[in-house]
Image (tube, grey):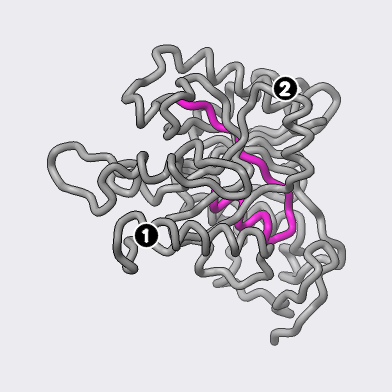
Amino acid sequence: MIRERFCHFAGSFECVVEMIAESELIVTPEGAVYHLNLKPEMIASKIILVGDPNRVNRVAERFTDIKYRVANREFCTVTGMYKGHAVTALSTGIGTDNVDIVMNELDALVNIDLEKRELLPTHTRLKMLRLGTCGGVQEDIPTGTFILSRYSIGSDGLMNFYDYNRQSQHVHLAESFTSYLQEKIGRKDLPFIPFGTGMNPTWADRIRQAQPNILQGINFTGNGFYGPQGRVTGRVGVKLDGLEKILREYSFDGYPIMNIEMETSGIYGLAEAFGHEAASISVILANRSAKKFHPNIGVLIEDLIDIGLDLIIE
């Protein structure tokens, strides 16, 4: 049975399933969500998301009093204390297909009674911060620069499957970029349907105050690493050759496209749909326009983790 419920956190009506079928939300016999293998008590409300499972332990090295360590497939989770705050570090793996699993199951852990298979009466809002790596598109922004994605343009298609009340600014972003890209390539048919989303501007402004050296801009989320990001290896051509040049000439709301990676649009879109708060900070490893790659990834990642942990607890 399906009914509607007014969501005060989103200011809109949502579709509510009275009883969630076993096939739609899989719960293990031990009471954990299927892919993450986590129970509700195993996560904190403040979550660091990373792509690489090995990076979870690098985050957890800063924790004290570790409560839980869980690993299943590419999803590794550690929950502990950082400067007096409970924090979870969790790996998503690569791509928005994995992000779809992570975001749905994290929301289920805090907003669904897994035993009764019903929505909980009170909505719990998670605060999530993605720490990742990316390719830069602006030639004058060097490798090693940290980028906060104030907006994100998804080319991956994930959020086009979801029906929810989108912010008008994010709808305008998608429409604006679609028109720009059609004009730029000289045809209406695109190899993907652009989707616009973004983070809470109030949190973005707080991050700017706390970390003024972190640049803010628009992220482009690709549906793969090679062809969907315009990379040509010499074996097969791509439909959007020179994609980095196309992207770097676009701007919206005063912000240019700064970087390309593979997760942010899914994290932002599902956070908006579920009523959570999410931000994404990436360090530029490769400057796609200048054709340069940073020689010291390890130091950059350590600095990114330190900054990210302090931002998630502020």
Q: Is residue 213 above or below residue 41?
A: above
Q: Is residue 33 visible?
A: no
Magenta highlight range: 265-284
**Residue occupying the point 49% across, 30% down:** 133
Of the 4 image quadrants, the one containing the N terminus is bottom right
- Total number of numbered discs in the rendering: 2
Q: Is residue 268 left or right of residue 212?
A: left
Q: Is residue 159 left or right of residue 193?
A: right
**Residue occupying the point 50% across, 19% down:** 144
Q: Is residue 268 magenta?
A: yes
Q: Nearer the viewer, residue 89 or 260?
A: 260
**Residue occupying the point 82% across, 60% down:** 123
Q: Inspect the image, locate mark 2, and give the three-letter code of the amino acid beneath it.
A: Phe
Locate residue 189, reporting x and y percent: 32, 68
Name the mark on residue 11: none
Q: Is residue 237 above or below residue 295?
A: below
Locate residue 151, reporting x and y percent: 60, 47
